[in-house]
Amino acid sequence: MNYYKLLGVDITATQKEIQTAFWKISLETHPDRHGGDPEKEARFKAAQQAYAVLHDEELRRVYDRMAIPPETVKDLLLKSRAGRTALDLFLPKAPAEPACGEDVLIKRYVSRKDLRKGTVITVEHEGREWFITLPPSTAKLLIARLAGHGRPGRKGGNNGDLLVAVVAKG
């Protein structure tokens, strides 16, 4: 699901434009205003999820890199994905300066019940294991950031981060 299309905004939209689009959809689809219409309720919930990701700068950056596939050949060749484009694969060049490593995104699915009451999840990545405590919450999407545990940096650059997306299942 493309969150930008769902809200009816462009990928270059400002926070104000995203907020305005969400409010407009909320007014049109909120269950309190249109109770009993399952289509409007589903659209409202999808818009809520899109807004939750796009209004948060860090989540938006992760979403932009990981969730939006290129739609055209032009996007594939020119759209930067984690600092690189497809052209970089064919025309490699050494960076002149230190470069940060790429972030790594791992998804973990947790039951809504466990998210509401709080739980501890285990994450394994490249032979290491972390225990992440999830506080009691009603959020459907949480992002845990383990700084410096992503891909290694180049030429002395900082390592990327390990991002764990905890998603409600069911």
Image (spheres, rainbow, N blue to C red):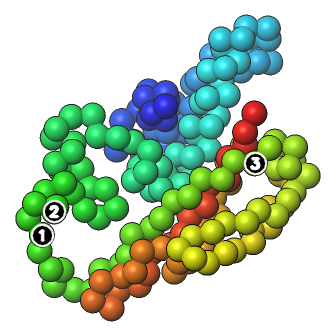
The answer for how far apart the CA atoms under marks 2 and 1 are is: 5 Å
Is the residue marked by circle 2 packed among few (<14), some (14-19), or many (20+) residues within 10 Å?
Answer: few
The answer for how far apart the CA atoms under marks 3 and 2 are is: 37 Å
Pointers 2 and 1 in contact (C-beta within 8 Å): yes
Q: SS at mark 2?
A: helix
Return the x and y of residue 45 as percentages of the image width and height.
67, 28
Residue 38 visible in image: yes
Say which residue appears at 17% left-offset and 50% top-offset: 78
Q: Residue furthest top?
A: 37
Return the x and y of residue 16 as percentages of the image width and height.
49, 43
Name which residue type carries label 2: Asp
Return the x and y of residue 57 as percentages of the image width and height.
51, 57
Of label 3 and label 2, which has the lower sequence position?
Answer: 2
In the rendered structure, the answer to whether residue 161 lies left or right of residue 112 reads: left
Q: Residue furthest right?
A: 117
Return the x and y of residue 56 as percentages of the image width and height.
56, 53
Say which residue appears at 70% left-offset and 18% top-offset: 41
Q: Where is the C terminus found, in terms of image quarters?
A: top right
Which label is found at residue 92?
A: 1
Q: Based on the displayed image, in which of its 4 quarters is residue 26 positioned? A: top right
Q: Based on the displayed image, in which of its 4 quarters is residue 38 positioned? A: top right
Q: Which residue is mark 2?
A: 88
Name which residue type carries label 3: Val
Comparing 128 with 46, the one in front is: 128
Name which residue type carries label 1: Pro
Say how many tags the image has: 3
Above or below, 162 against 152 in this view is above
Is the residue marked by circle 1 packed among few (<14), some (14-19), or many (20+) residues within 10 Å?
Answer: few
Of label 3 and label 1, which has the lower sequence position?
Answer: 1
Q: Which residue is mark 3?
A: 110
In the rendered structure, the answer to whether residue 9 lies left or right of residue 130 reads: left
